[in-house]
Image (cartoon, helix red, strand yellow):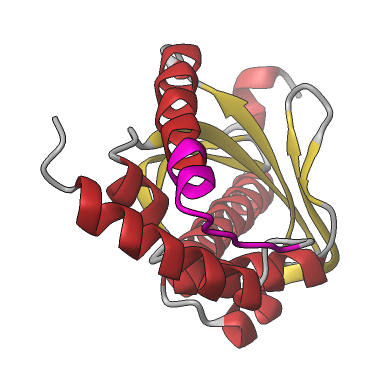
């Protein structure tokens, strides 16, 4: 049997169609997982997020540093984000083999109060047993200039807090820390809202 005849073989053709259908179906499921995950994070729905991620979930920057080390830390970060109106904007989504790649923009009340620029990242989602296993986070062109600009804005905020004896403390980014930080940010924003 030559190669040309293989493509005309009905059983082989059926097998190829089923295999392609399964792969395409899994890709759609993974895309749905990612969009549901982002939506649940934007709604601060920790219960929904919990159903979408693997028990050993983590987020890793391309340099090897961990942004999120565990599922529990992610839940705390979501509740911190709720206090600060954190939001993820999905700018692009694509498929690369068994991963989903997104371009995401992250904003929160720190950006509003400090007049910072939003951060954009290229995120590669990996999957295990029908759940999101982890994220690999990469920066995009222009990231360093945004970080420098935002660092200046944050230093202005720190100086203001020191000058006015304002404190906010937290050992980790969780709900309690978010509540404290939000109060200080609200005060800072009200004083500085007309600054250029």
The foreground one among 80 and 68 is: 80
The foreground one among 104 and 108 is: 108
The foreground one among 139 and 162 is: 162
Residue 144 x, y percent position in the rendering: 50, 14
Mark yes or no: residue 53 visible: yes
Residue 70 x, y percent position in the rendering: 84, 61
In this view, 100 is above or below 22: above
Quadrant in the rendering for residue 86: bottom left
In this view, 168 is above or below 195: below
Please name the residue shown 49% across and 26% down the image.
151
**Does residue 79 appear to the left or right of 107 in the view shown?**
right
Mark yes or no: residue 94 visible: no
The residue sitting at the bottom extreme is 47
Please provide the residue range marked out in magenta.
159-170
Residue 79 x, y percent position in the rendering: 58, 75
**Does residue 1 appear to the left or right of 18 in the view shown?**
right
Q: Is residue 151 in the magenta section?
A: no
């Amino acid at each position: 049997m030559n190669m040309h005849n293989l493509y005309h073989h009905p059983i082989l053709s059926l097998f190829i169609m089923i295999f392609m259908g399964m792969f395409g179906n899994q890709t759609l499921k993974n895309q749905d997982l990612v969009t549901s995950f982002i939506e649940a994070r934007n709604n601060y729905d920790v219960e929904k997020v919990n159903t979408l991620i693997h028990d050993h979930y983590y987020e890793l920057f391309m340099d090897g540093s961990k942004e999120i080390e565990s599922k529990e830390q992610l839940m705390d970060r979501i509740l911190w984000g709720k206090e600060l109106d954190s939001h993820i904007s999905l700018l692009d989504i694509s498929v690369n083999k068994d991963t989903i790649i997104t371009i995401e923009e992250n904003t929160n009340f720190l950006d509003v109060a400090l007049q910072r620029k939003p951060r954009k990242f290229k995120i590669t989602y990996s999957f295990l047993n029908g759940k999101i296993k982890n994220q690999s986070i990469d920066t995009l062109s222009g990231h360093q200039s945004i970080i420098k600009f935002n660092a200046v804005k944050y230093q202005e905020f720190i100086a203001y807090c020191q000058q006015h004896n304002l404190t906010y403390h937290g050992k980790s980014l969780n709900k309690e820390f978010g509540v404290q930080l939000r109060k200080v940010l609200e005060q800072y924003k009200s004083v500085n809202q007309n600054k250029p």
